[in-house]
Amino acid sequence: MQEAVINRAKELLADGTVNRVAGWKTGEFSFDTTPAVFTSAEELDADFVYNDFCAPNLSKYLVKESRKEGKLLVFLKPCDTYSFNQLVKEHRILRENVYVIGVECTGKVDAETVKLKGIKGITSMESDGENVTIHTLYGNKVLPKSETLGTKCATCKSKKHVAYDELIGNDGEVDEESKRFEVVEKLEAMTPDERYEFWRGELSRCIRCNACRNVCPACTCESCVFDNPDSGIAQKAAADSFEENMFHIIRAFHVTGRCTDCGECTRVCPQNIPLHLLNRKYIKDINKFYGDFQAGADTISKAPLNDYTFGDCEPSIVYSRGGNE
Amino acid sequence: MQVNENKEFRPLIVAFCCNWCSYAGADLAGTNRMNYPADVKIIRVPCSCRVNPMFILRAFQRGADGVIMCGCHPGDCHYTSGNYFARRRMTLLFSMLDFLGIEKERTRVEWVSAAEGAKFAATMNEFVETVTKLGENKRLEDLRCKKQ
Protein backbone atom coordinates (compact mmCIF):
# COMPACT_ATOMS: atom_id res chain seq x y z
CA MET A 1 0.00 0.00 0.00
CA GLN A 2 2.70 2.48 1.00
CA GLU A 3 4.64 1.73 -2.18
CA ALA A 4 1.63 2.29 -4.42
CA VAL A 5 0.90 5.56 -2.66
CA ILE A 6 4.48 6.85 -3.00
CA ASN A 7 4.71 5.80 -6.65
CA ARG A 8 1.50 7.60 -7.56
CA ALA A 9 2.66 10.71 -5.70
CA LYS A 10 5.95 10.66 -7.61
CA GLU A 11 4.10 10.33 -10.93
CA LEU A 12 1.89 13.32 -10.17
CA LEU A 13 4.87 15.37 -9.04
CA ALA A 14 6.82 14.42 -12.18
CA ASP A 15 4.07 15.30 -14.67
CA GLY A 16 3.48 18.63 -12.98
CA THR A 17 -0.13 18.03 -11.88
CA VAL A 18 0.88 18.99 -8.38
CA ASN A 19 3.89 20.65 -6.82
CA ARG A 20 3.49 19.48 -3.25
CA VAL A 21 2.28 16.37 -1.49
CA ALA A 22 0.60 16.33 1.91
CA GLY A 23 1.06 13.06 3.75
CA TRP A 24 2.49 11.51 6.86
CA LYS A 25 6.01 10.95 8.13
CA THR A 26 7.31 9.14 11.16
CA GLY A 27 7.60 11.27 14.24
CA GLU A 28 9.56 10.59 17.38
CA PHE A 29 8.40 6.97 17.50
CA SER A 30 7.44 4.60 14.71
CA PHE A 31 3.83 4.57 15.94
CA ASP A 32 3.71 8.33 16.18
CA THR A 33 3.16 9.68 12.68
CA THR A 34 2.97 13.35 11.98
CA PRO A 35 1.50 15.29 9.05
CA ALA A 36 4.06 16.64 6.58
CA VAL A 37 4.30 18.33 3.21
CA PHE A 38 6.75 16.89 0.66
CA THR A 39 8.03 18.71 -2.40
CA SER A 40 10.29 16.20 -4.16
CA ALA A 41 10.58 12.52 -5.01
CA GLU A 42 13.68 12.22 -2.80
CA GLU A 43 11.80 13.53 0.22
CA LEU A 44 8.98 11.10 -0.46
CA ASP A 45 11.40 8.18 -0.60
CA ALA A 46 13.13 9.24 2.55
CA ASP A 47 10.24 10.09 4.87
CA PHE A 48 6.77 9.32 3.49
CA VAL A 49 4.85 6.63 5.33
CA TYR A 50 1.37 5.21 4.97
CA ASN A 51 0.71 2.40 7.40
CA ASP A 52 -1.60 1.40 10.23
CA PHE A 53 -0.37 4.27 12.39
CA CYS A 54 -1.31 7.15 10.08
CA ALA A 55 -4.27 8.37 12.10
CA PRO A 56 -3.91 12.17 11.70
CA ASN A 57 -6.62 13.78 9.61
CA LEU A 58 -4.96 15.94 6.95
CA SER A 59 -8.02 17.87 5.81
CA LYS A 60 -7.58 20.82 8.19
CA TYR A 61 -4.11 21.59 6.84
CA LEU A 62 -5.66 22.22 3.45
CA VAL A 63 -7.30 25.41 4.69
CA LYS A 64 -3.91 27.10 4.60
CA GLU A 65 -2.18 24.86 2.06
CA SER A 66 -4.83 25.25 -0.64
CA ARG A 67 -4.25 29.02 -0.57
CA LYS A 68 -0.58 28.68 -1.45
CA GLU A 69 0.72 28.68 -4.97
CA GLY A 70 0.29 25.60 -7.10
CA LYS A 71 -1.76 22.49 -6.68
CA LEU A 72 -1.42 20.18 -3.72
CA LEU A 73 -1.81 16.42 -3.62
CA VAL A 74 -3.39 15.11 -0.46
CA PHE A 75 -4.11 11.61 0.77
CA LEU A 76 -7.37 11.21 2.64
CA LYS A 77 -8.75 8.27 4.52
CA PRO A 78 -12.53 7.68 4.34
CA CYS A 79 -13.33 9.56 7.56
CA ASP A 80 -11.05 12.42 6.49
CA THR A 81 -13.03 12.88 3.29
CA TYR A 82 -16.08 13.83 5.38
CA SER A 83 -14.11 16.61 7.04
CA PHE A 84 -12.78 17.61 3.64
CA ASN A 85 -16.28 17.82 2.19
CA GLN A 86 -17.48 19.85 5.13
CA LEU A 87 -14.64 22.33 4.70
CA VAL A 88 -15.29 22.61 0.97
CA LYS A 89 -18.94 23.29 1.77
CA GLU A 90 -17.91 26.10 4.11
CA HIS A 91 -15.60 27.54 1.45
CA ARG A 92 -12.60 26.99 3.68
CA ILE A 93 -10.73 24.81 1.19
CA LEU A 94 -10.21 25.94 -2.39
CA ARG A 95 -11.21 22.71 -4.08
CA GLU A 96 -9.56 23.54 -7.41
CA ASN A 97 -6.14 23.76 -5.74
CA VAL A 98 -6.32 20.31 -4.27
CA TYR A 99 -5.90 16.90 -5.86
CA VAL A 100 -7.41 14.28 -3.56
CA ILE A 101 -6.41 10.66 -3.54
CA GLY A 102 -8.58 8.49 -1.34
CA VAL A 103 -6.62 5.77 0.40
CA GLU A 104 -8.06 2.60 1.81
CA CYS A 105 -8.20 2.39 5.57
CA THR A 106 -8.72 -0.63 7.77
CA GLY A 107 -8.58 1.22 11.07
CA LYS A 108 -5.59 2.84 12.72
CA VAL A 109 -3.64 1.64 15.73
CA ASP A 110 -3.56 4.04 18.64
CA ALA A 111 -0.71 3.97 21.15
CA GLU A 112 -3.01 5.22 23.90
CA THR A 113 -5.27 2.18 23.56
CA VAL A 114 -2.21 -0.06 23.87
CA LYS A 115 -0.93 1.84 26.91
CA LEU A 116 -4.34 1.53 28.59
CA LYS A 117 -3.91 -2.24 28.38
CA GLY A 118 -1.07 -1.86 30.85
CA ILE A 119 1.76 -2.18 28.34
CA LYS A 120 4.54 0.16 29.38
CA GLY A 121 7.84 1.33 27.94
CA ILE A 122 6.83 1.03 24.30
CA THR A 123 9.77 1.67 21.97
CA SER A 124 8.19 0.81 18.63
CA MET A 125 5.26 -0.97 17.03
CA GLU A 126 4.74 -2.84 13.78
CA SER A 127 1.54 -3.94 12.16
CA ASP A 128 1.04 -6.56 9.46
CA GLY A 129 -2.65 -5.79 9.09
CA GLU A 130 -3.77 -8.65 11.35
CA ASN A 131 -1.55 -8.43 14.38
CA VAL A 132 0.40 -5.65 15.99
CA THR A 133 3.85 -6.43 17.38
CA ILE A 134 4.72 -4.13 20.26
CA HIS A 135 8.37 -3.76 21.19
CA THR A 136 8.83 -2.59 24.74
CA LEU A 137 11.72 -2.18 27.13
CA TYR A 138 10.48 -5.36 28.81
CA GLY A 139 10.17 -7.58 25.76
CA ASN A 140 7.86 -8.01 22.82
CA LYS A 141 4.13 -8.46 22.80
CA VAL A 142 1.68 -9.32 20.04
CA LEU A 143 -1.91 -8.14 20.06
CA PRO A 144 -4.61 -8.58 17.42
CA LYS A 145 -5.03 -5.29 15.56
CA SER A 146 -8.73 -5.08 16.44
CA GLU A 147 -7.77 -4.66 20.10
CA THR A 148 -5.37 -1.81 19.47
CA LEU A 149 -7.60 0.48 17.44
CA GLY A 150 -8.14 4.04 18.63
CA THR A 151 -11.61 5.10 19.82
CA LYS A 152 -12.41 6.71 16.50
CA CYS A 153 -11.60 3.54 14.57
CA ALA A 154 -13.16 1.08 16.98
CA THR A 155 -16.53 2.74 16.28
CA CYS A 156 -15.87 3.62 12.64
CA LYS A 157 -18.98 5.03 10.96
CA SER A 158 -17.97 4.71 7.33
CA LYS A 159 -15.28 3.25 5.13
CA LYS A 160 -16.69 5.02 2.09
CA HIS A 161 -14.81 7.91 0.50
CA VAL A 162 -17.24 10.78 -0.11
CA ALA A 163 -14.83 13.00 -2.03
CA TYR A 164 -11.85 12.07 -4.17
CA ASP A 165 -10.23 12.54 -7.56
CA GLU A 166 -8.90 9.03 -7.61
CA LEU A 167 -8.71 6.04 -5.31
CA ILE A 168 -5.89 3.76 -4.24
CA GLY A 169 -7.19 0.53 -2.76
CA ASN A 170 -10.84 -0.34 -2.31
CA ASP A 171 -13.74 1.87 -1.38
CA GLY A 172 -15.82 0.62 1.54
CA GLU A 173 -19.39 1.12 2.68
CA VAL A 174 -21.12 3.28 5.24
CA ASP A 175 -21.49 1.20 8.37
CA GLU A 176 -25.17 1.45 9.25
CA GLU A 177 -24.71 -0.83 12.23
CA SER A 178 -21.98 1.28 13.77
CA LYS A 179 -22.05 1.22 17.55
CA ARG A 180 -20.82 4.76 17.87
CA PHE A 181 -23.66 5.98 20.09
CA GLU A 182 -23.37 3.09 22.52
CA VAL A 183 -21.42 4.98 25.19
CA VAL A 184 -23.64 8.05 24.84
CA GLU A 185 -26.68 5.84 25.39
CA LYS A 186 -25.05 4.29 28.43
CA LEU A 187 -24.49 7.75 29.89
CA GLU A 188 -28.04 8.82 29.09
CA ALA A 189 -29.34 5.84 31.03
CA MET A 190 -27.56 7.04 34.18
CA THR A 191 -29.13 9.39 36.72
CA PRO A 192 -28.15 13.08 36.48
CA ASP A 193 -26.02 12.69 39.62
CA GLU A 194 -24.05 9.83 38.14
CA ARG A 195 -23.58 11.74 34.91
CA TYR A 196 -22.40 14.76 36.82
CA GLU A 197 -19.85 12.67 38.70
CA PHE A 198 -18.69 11.03 35.49
CA TRP A 199 -18.11 14.34 33.72
CA ARG A 200 -16.46 15.96 36.72
CA GLY A 201 -14.03 13.07 36.77
CA GLU A 202 -13.30 13.43 33.08
CA LEU A 203 -13.34 17.19 32.60
CA SER A 204 -11.40 18.03 35.75
CA ARG A 205 -8.37 16.46 34.09
CA CYS A 206 -8.49 19.09 31.34
CA ILE A 207 -5.34 21.21 31.22
CA ARG A 208 -6.73 23.58 28.58
CA CYS A 209 -3.93 22.81 26.14
CA ASN A 210 -6.41 23.60 23.34
CA ALA A 211 -5.20 20.58 21.35
CA CYS A 212 -8.81 19.47 20.73
CA ARG A 213 -9.60 22.86 19.26
CA ASN A 214 -6.43 23.12 17.23
CA VAL A 215 -6.81 19.71 15.62
CA CYS A 216 -10.55 19.90 14.96
CA PRO A 217 -11.26 20.18 11.21
CA ALA A 218 -14.51 22.01 12.01
CA CYS A 219 -12.74 24.64 14.17
CA THR A 220 -11.25 26.84 11.49
CA CYS A 221 -12.22 30.33 12.62
CA GLU A 222 -9.48 32.88 12.00
CA SER A 223 -9.96 34.25 15.49
CA CYS A 224 -11.37 32.04 18.16
CA VAL A 225 -13.60 32.95 21.08
CA PHE A 226 -11.16 31.16 23.36
CA ASP A 227 -8.32 33.45 22.24
CA ASN A 228 -10.19 36.60 23.16
CA PRO A 229 -8.05 38.25 25.87
CA ASP A 230 -11.13 40.01 27.28
CA SER A 231 -13.00 36.79 27.87
CA GLY A 232 -10.99 35.88 30.95
CA ILE A 233 -10.58 32.34 29.70
CA ALA A 234 -7.94 32.82 27.00
CA GLN A 235 -4.63 30.97 27.05
CA LYS A 236 -4.79 29.68 30.55
CA ALA A 237 -5.71 26.57 32.46
CA ALA A 238 -9.32 26.35 33.60
CA ALA A 239 -9.50 27.89 37.04
CA ASP A 240 -12.50 25.98 38.33
CA SER A 241 -15.16 23.51 37.37
CA PHE A 242 -17.22 26.19 35.70
CA GLU A 243 -14.53 27.05 33.19
CA GLU A 244 -13.95 23.39 32.42
CA ASN A 245 -17.65 22.90 31.77
CA MET A 246 -17.95 26.07 29.76
CA PHE A 247 -14.95 25.40 27.56
CA HIS A 248 -16.15 21.95 26.64
CA ILE A 249 -19.81 22.87 26.16
CA ILE A 250 -18.89 25.80 23.93
CA ARG A 251 -16.22 23.88 22.03
CA ALA A 252 -18.70 21.15 21.24
CA PHE A 253 -21.53 23.58 20.52
CA HIS A 254 -19.49 25.58 18.03
CA VAL A 255 -19.13 22.51 15.84
CA THR A 256 -22.70 21.25 16.24
CA GLY A 257 -24.12 20.22 12.93
CA ARG A 258 -20.68 20.55 11.34
CA CYS A 259 -18.84 17.91 13.33
CA THR A 260 -18.29 14.89 11.10
CA ASP A 261 -17.41 12.71 14.08
CA CYS A 262 -13.83 12.17 12.92
CA GLY A 263 -12.73 11.64 16.51
CA GLU A 264 -9.55 13.70 16.30
CA CYS A 265 -10.37 15.59 19.53
CA THR A 266 -10.21 12.44 21.61
CA ARG A 267 -7.18 11.10 19.77
CA VAL A 268 -5.03 14.14 20.49
CA CYS A 269 -6.20 14.75 24.06
CA PRO A 270 -3.12 14.32 26.25
CA GLN A 271 -5.39 13.61 29.22
CA ASN A 272 -7.50 10.97 27.44
CA ILE A 273 -10.76 12.83 27.99
CA PRO A 274 -13.48 11.24 25.81
CA LEU A 275 -14.34 14.56 24.14
CA HIS A 276 -16.01 12.92 21.18
CA LEU A 277 -18.85 11.89 23.50
CA LEU A 278 -19.96 15.52 23.73
CA ASN A 279 -19.94 15.85 19.96
CA ARG A 280 -21.72 12.55 19.55
CA LYS A 281 -24.40 13.62 22.00
CA TYR A 282 -25.12 16.61 19.77
CA ILE A 283 -25.09 14.42 16.66
CA LYS A 284 -27.42 11.93 18.31
CA ASP A 285 -29.80 14.72 19.36
CA ILE A 286 -29.80 16.23 15.89
CA ASN A 287 -30.54 12.84 14.35
CA LYS A 288 -33.37 12.30 16.78
CA PHE A 289 -34.94 15.76 16.74
CA TYR A 290 -34.34 16.95 13.19
CA GLY A 291 -33.83 13.80 11.18
CA ASP A 292 -30.67 11.91 10.30
CA PHE A 293 -27.86 14.15 9.28
CA GLN A 294 -24.26 13.35 8.53
CA ALA A 295 -22.06 16.42 8.24
CA GLY A 296 -19.72 16.23 5.28
CA ALA A 297 -21.64 13.51 3.47
CA ASP A 298 -22.23 16.02 0.67
CA THR A 299 -21.42 19.64 -0.11
CA ILE A 300 -24.92 21.01 -0.68
CA SER A 301 -27.20 20.10 2.24
CA LYS A 302 -28.08 22.70 4.84
CA ALA A 303 -26.59 22.32 8.31
CA PRO A 304 -29.23 21.59 10.97
CA LEU A 305 -28.54 24.80 12.88
CA ASN A 306 -28.81 26.89 9.70
CA ASP A 307 -32.17 25.44 8.99
CA TYR A 308 -35.57 25.02 10.62
CA THR A 309 -38.99 23.61 10.02
CA PHE A 310 -42.25 24.96 11.38
CA GLY A 311 -42.92 21.72 13.16
CA ASP A 312 -39.65 21.42 15.08
CA CYS A 313 -39.92 20.03 18.57
CA GLU A 314 -40.07 22.52 21.43
CA PRO A 315 -37.13 22.77 23.85
CA SER A 316 -39.46 21.38 26.51
CA ILE A 317 -38.86 17.96 24.93
CA VAL A 318 -35.73 17.87 27.08
CA TYR A 319 -37.83 17.96 30.27
CA SER A 320 -40.67 15.81 29.19
CA ARG A 321 -38.63 12.87 27.99
CA GLY A 322 -38.96 10.25 30.60
CA GLY A 323 -36.54 8.33 32.75
CA ASN A 324 -33.00 9.52 33.08
CA GLU A 325 -32.49 10.12 29.40
CA MET B 1 -27.88 48.24 60.27
CA GLN B 2 -28.58 44.77 59.11
CA VAL B 3 -29.86 44.23 55.68
CA ASN B 4 -31.10 40.86 54.55
CA GLU B 5 -32.05 39.44 57.89
CA ASN B 6 -34.17 36.97 56.12
CA LYS B 7 -31.86 34.07 55.30
CA GLU B 8 -34.47 32.22 53.35
CA PHE B 9 -33.14 31.28 49.93
CA ARG B 10 -34.20 33.52 47.08
CA PRO B 11 -33.03 32.47 43.64
CA LEU B 12 -31.60 34.80 41.05
CA ILE B 13 -33.34 34.34 37.74
CA VAL B 14 -32.17 35.82 34.48
CA ALA B 15 -34.84 36.20 31.81
CA PHE B 16 -33.82 36.96 28.24
CA CYS B 17 -36.84 38.64 26.67
CA CYS B 18 -37.18 39.56 23.05
CA ASN B 19 -37.88 43.22 22.40
CA TRP B 20 -40.99 42.70 20.30
CA CYS B 21 -43.09 40.20 22.19
CA SER B 22 -41.94 39.06 25.59
CA TYR B 23 -40.54 42.36 26.79
CA ALA B 24 -43.82 44.00 25.86
CA GLY B 25 -45.56 41.11 27.58
CA ALA B 26 -43.59 41.83 30.74
CA ASP B 27 -44.57 45.48 30.40
CA LEU B 28 -48.19 44.52 30.14
CA ALA B 29 -47.90 42.35 33.24
CA GLY B 30 -46.54 45.42 35.01
CA THR B 31 -49.15 47.88 33.84
CA ASN B 32 -51.84 45.39 34.77
CA ARG B 33 -50.39 45.14 38.28
CA MET B 34 -49.82 41.42 38.07
CA ASN B 35 -47.47 39.98 40.63
CA TYR B 36 -44.35 38.15 39.72
CA PRO B 37 -41.26 37.73 41.91
CA ALA B 38 -38.62 40.45 41.98
CA ASP B 39 -35.99 37.70 41.67
CA VAL B 40 -36.47 37.79 37.92
CA LYS B 41 -33.99 40.08 36.21
CA ILE B 42 -34.98 40.83 32.66
CA ILE B 43 -32.42 41.33 29.92
CA ARG B 44 -33.88 42.75 26.75
CA VAL B 45 -32.57 41.31 23.51
CA PRO B 46 -33.59 42.31 19.98
CA CYS B 47 -34.74 38.78 19.18
CA SER B 48 -34.60 35.42 20.93
CA CYS B 49 -32.18 34.44 18.18
CA ARG B 50 -29.72 36.97 19.60
CA VAL B 51 -29.19 34.75 22.61
CA ASN B 52 -25.88 33.03 22.19
CA PRO B 53 -25.51 29.80 24.22
CA MET B 54 -22.57 31.54 25.84
CA PHE B 55 -24.94 34.18 27.31
CA ILE B 56 -26.75 31.46 29.18
CA LEU B 57 -23.55 29.99 30.56
CA ARG B 58 -22.30 33.46 31.42
CA ALA B 59 -25.49 34.15 33.37
CA PHE B 60 -24.89 31.00 35.40
CA GLN B 61 -21.29 32.03 35.91
CA ARG B 62 -22.32 35.37 37.34
CA GLY B 63 -24.53 33.69 39.88
CA ALA B 64 -27.87 33.01 38.22
CA ASP B 65 -29.76 30.04 39.61
CA GLY B 66 -32.03 29.77 36.63
CA VAL B 67 -32.16 31.15 33.12
CA ILE B 68 -35.31 31.51 31.07
CA MET B 69 -35.54 32.69 27.50
CA CYS B 70 -38.74 34.24 26.21
CA GLY B 71 -39.50 35.00 22.60
CA CYS B 72 -42.33 35.51 20.17
CA HIS B 73 -44.48 32.52 19.41
CA PRO B 74 -43.13 30.46 16.51
CA GLY B 75 -44.46 32.10 13.36
CA ASP B 76 -44.75 35.53 14.99
CA CYS B 77 -41.10 36.53 14.99
CA HIS B 78 -40.54 40.18 14.14
CA TYR B 79 -37.65 39.05 11.94
CA THR B 80 -39.69 36.23 10.39
CA SER B 81 -37.59 33.26 11.46
CA GLY B 82 -35.32 34.19 14.37
CA ASN B 83 -37.13 32.16 16.98
CA TYR B 84 -37.08 29.04 14.83
CA PHE B 85 -33.28 29.09 14.87
CA ALA B 86 -33.24 29.93 18.57
CA ARG B 87 -35.53 27.00 19.23
CA ARG B 88 -33.12 24.51 17.67
CA ARG B 89 -30.13 26.02 19.41
CA MET B 90 -31.67 26.03 22.85
CA THR B 91 -33.04 22.51 22.51
CA LEU B 92 -29.55 21.24 21.82
CA LEU B 93 -27.91 23.34 24.52
CA PHE B 94 -30.37 22.28 27.21
CA SER B 95 -30.04 18.69 26.19
CA MET B 96 -26.27 19.02 26.59
CA LEU B 97 -26.58 20.60 30.04
CA ASP B 98 -28.74 17.66 31.02
CA PHE B 99 -26.14 15.29 29.56
CA LEU B 100 -23.48 16.84 31.78
CA GLY B 101 -25.69 16.24 34.80
CA ILE B 102 -26.76 19.83 35.37
CA GLU B 103 -30.38 20.09 36.50
CA LYS B 104 -32.46 20.60 33.40
CA GLU B 105 -35.16 22.47 35.35
CA ARG B 106 -32.84 25.47 35.67
CA THR B 107 -33.23 26.38 32.02
CA ARG B 108 -36.39 27.01 30.10
CA VAL B 109 -37.77 28.50 26.92
CA GLU B 110 -41.22 30.02 26.88
CA TRP B 111 -43.04 31.79 24.06
CA VAL B 112 -44.83 34.89 25.33
CA SER B 113 -46.55 37.36 23.05
CA ALA B 114 -47.04 41.09 23.72
CA ALA B 115 -50.65 40.44 24.72
CA GLU B 116 -49.84 37.70 27.21
CA GLY B 117 -49.02 39.66 30.34
CA ALA B 118 -50.86 37.11 32.41
CA LYS B 119 -48.91 34.27 30.87
CA PHE B 120 -45.64 36.09 31.54
CA ALA B 121 -46.46 36.56 35.21
CA ALA B 122 -47.68 32.97 35.59
CA THR B 123 -44.60 31.57 33.86
CA MET B 124 -42.25 33.55 36.04
CA ASN B 125 -44.08 32.58 39.22
CA GLU B 126 -43.90 28.96 38.28
CA PHE B 127 -40.27 29.10 37.18
CA VAL B 128 -39.13 30.88 40.33
CA GLU B 129 -40.95 28.30 42.41
CA THR B 130 -39.25 25.44 40.55
CA VAL B 131 -35.79 26.96 40.94
CA THR B 132 -36.40 27.82 44.59
CA LYS B 133 -37.16 24.15 45.20
CA LEU B 134 -33.95 23.14 43.44
CA GLY B 135 -31.98 25.50 45.63
CA GLU B 136 -28.70 27.14 44.85
CA ASN B 137 -27.00 26.41 41.59
CA LYS B 138 -24.02 24.33 42.64
CA ARG B 139 -23.22 22.41 39.51
CA LEU B 140 -22.62 25.29 37.19
CA GLU B 141 -21.27 28.00 39.42
CA ASP B 142 -18.09 29.99 39.29
CA LEU B 143 -16.84 30.36 42.85
CA ARG B 144 -14.88 33.49 42.01
CA CYS B 145 -18.07 35.24 40.92
CA LYS B 146 -20.04 34.31 44.03
CA LYS B 147 -21.19 37.11 46.26
CA GLN B 148 -19.68 36.69 49.71
Image (cartoon, helix red, strand yellow):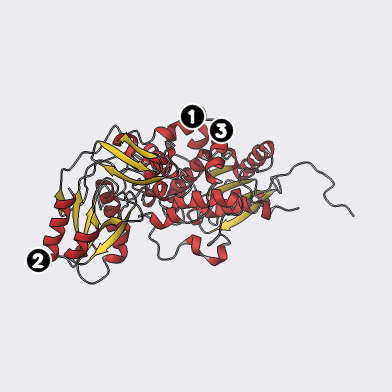
**Pointers 1 and 2 within a single chain:** yes
Taking depth in this image into account, of B87 and A143 the one nearest to the observer is A143
Q: Residues within 10 Å of mark 1 (few under 14, many from 20)?
A: some
Mark 3 = which residue? A194
Dot 3 falls on a residue whose secondary structure is helix
Disc on res. A15:
2
Residue B71 horizontal side relative to residue B32, left or right: left
Is label 2 or label 3 in front? 2
Q: Give SS at disc 1.
A: loop
Q: Nearer the viewer, residue A46 or A24?
A: A46
Residue A158 appears anywhere in the view: yes
Q: Residue at x 44, y 57 (%)?
A: B79
Label 3 packing within 10 angstroms: few (<14), some (14-19), many (20+) = some
Q: Nearer the viewer, residue A95 or A240?
A: A240
Circle 1 residue: A189
**Would you identify the image quadrant in which residue A292 lies?**
top left
Residue A197 lies in quadrant = top right
Q: Which residue is painted at 73% across and 44% down in the image?
A: B10
Q: Are marks 1 and 3 in contact (CB under 8 Å)?
A: no
Query: Eyeballing the image, is B27 above or below A159?
Result: below
N-terminal label among 2 and 3: 2
Earlier-in-chain disc, 1 versus 2: 2
Would you place residue A322 above or below residue A168 in this image?
Answer: above
Amino acid at the residue labelled 2: Asp
Instruction: Check disc 3 and give the amino acid type.
Output: Glu
Separation of residues labelled 1 and 3 (CA atoms):
10 Å
| Residue found at x 25% / y 53% | A299
